[in-house]
Image (cartoon, helix red, strand yellow):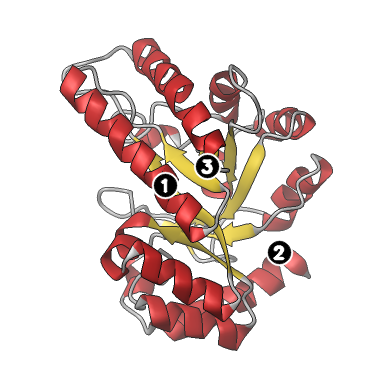
């Protein structure tokens, strides 16, 4: 999504040119290009699909809506398996229209995970609950902290359900470092994502994720937390940013890779 303006072949070519070894994919462009075609394209290029995003939106009360959500998540799990990634990122979903019951919404997520976890395990896929910043709680994700995500995940085996650690969503939370350690102790950090916090936020707030190094987050600090917790997997950069999407995608990808080296690795 950082460079969603690139076609799938352009994305793969750009990753190869820059020496980027893996790519986290989103379902919409994968479905547009074709799941099998994308799997072959990435596999033939020697790239790793690090994660597939996204499943989730599991808070519906209406039985038909709930059944549709579960079916779509099973499809997402199947797509992840076809692409060769072992991780499906879940954005849990916001409050249903007219509801103010956060507890009930979170319990419906747990119920859904009880159905989806075994299905994912059979296909070699792990579910990674991603807590989103509290500004998204009403419409997008009732899971706002790593503690809340782990309280859900720990009801299930770690090889079925874990968490996504995303700097953009948790950097403000003083308890997050301890929760990262908690997640690492039971092998529940299934992916680690980076985006910077820049202000002012845009209207609608969704596409406000800043380029690495442009904002307030110390990326090395958060990398140190996940490494201390035992995480050795891929690190993804996931930026939703209209200004970046309006630029040449190859330039944005090259810039992002350079910023990653400058602000995360060095």
Percent of width and height locating residue 158: 66, 29
The residue positioned farthest toward the front in the image shown: 122
Residue marked by disc 3: 123
Element class at badge 1:
helix
Q: Residue at x 36, y 30 (%)?
A: 137
Percent of width and height locating residue 68: 23, 32
> Seen in the image, is 102 located left or right of residue 166?
left
Q: Nearer the viewer, residue 174 or 29?
A: 29
Element class at badge 2:
helix
Q: Is the residue 137 above or below the residue 155 in the image?
A: below
Percent of width and height locating residue 49: 55, 62
Q: Is the residue 61 above or below the residue 25 in the image?
A: above
Q: Earlier in the sequence, mark 3 or mark 1?
A: 1
On the image, which quarter does residue 154 sit in? top right
Element class at badge 3:
loop
Q: Quadrant of the C terminus?
A: bottom right
Residue marked by disc 1: 78
| Mark seen at residue 108 | none
Q: Nearer the viewer, mark 3 or mark 2?
A: 3
Q: Quadrant of the N terminus?
A: bottom left
Mark 3, other Cα within 10 Å: few <14 / some 14–19 / many ≥20: some
Percent of width and height locating residue 99: 22, 15
Check if mark 3's residue and mark 1's residue have beta carbons within 8 Å. Answer: yes
Mark 2, other Cα within 10 Å: few <14 / some 14–19 / many ≥20: some
Q: Is the residue 55 above or below the residue 18 in the image?
A: above
Q: Residue at x 41, y 16 (%)?
A: 111
- Does residue 213 appear in the picture of this structure? yes
Residue marked by disc 2: 264
């Amino acid at each position: 999504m950082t460079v969603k303006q690139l076609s799938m072949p352009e994305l793969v070519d750009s990753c190869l040119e820059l020496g980027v070894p893996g790519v986290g994919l989103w379902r919409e462009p994968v479905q547009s290009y074709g799941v099998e075609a994308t799997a072959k394209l990435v596999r033939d290029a020697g790239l790793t699909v690090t994660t597939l995003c996204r499943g989730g939106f599991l808070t519906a009360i209406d039985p038909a809506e709930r059944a549709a959500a579960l079916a779509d998540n099973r499809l997402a799990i199947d797509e992840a398996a076809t692409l060769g990634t072992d991780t499906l990122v879940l954005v849990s979903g916001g409050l249903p229209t007219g509801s103010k019951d956060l507890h009930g919404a979170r319990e419906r997520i747990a119920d859904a995970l009880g159905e989806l976890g075994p299905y994912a395990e059979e296909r070699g896929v792990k579910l990674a609950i991603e807590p989103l910043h509290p500004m998204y709680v009403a419409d997008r994700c009732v899971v706002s902290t790593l503690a809340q995500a782990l309280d859900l995940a720990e009801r299930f085996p770690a090889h079925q359900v874990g968490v996504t650690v995303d700097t953009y969503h948790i950097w403000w939370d003083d308890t997050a470092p301890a929760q990262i350690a908690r997640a690492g102790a039971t092998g529940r950090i299934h992916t680690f994502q980076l985006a910077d916090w820049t202000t002012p936020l845009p209207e609608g707030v969704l596409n406000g994720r800043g380029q690495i190094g442009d904002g307030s987050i110390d990326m090395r600090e958060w990398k140190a937390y996940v490494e201390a917790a035992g995480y050795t997997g891929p690190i993804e950069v996931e930026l939703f940013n209209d200004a970046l999407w309006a630029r040449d995608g190859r330039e944005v990808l090259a810039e992002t890779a350079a910023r990653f080296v400058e602000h995360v690795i060095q």
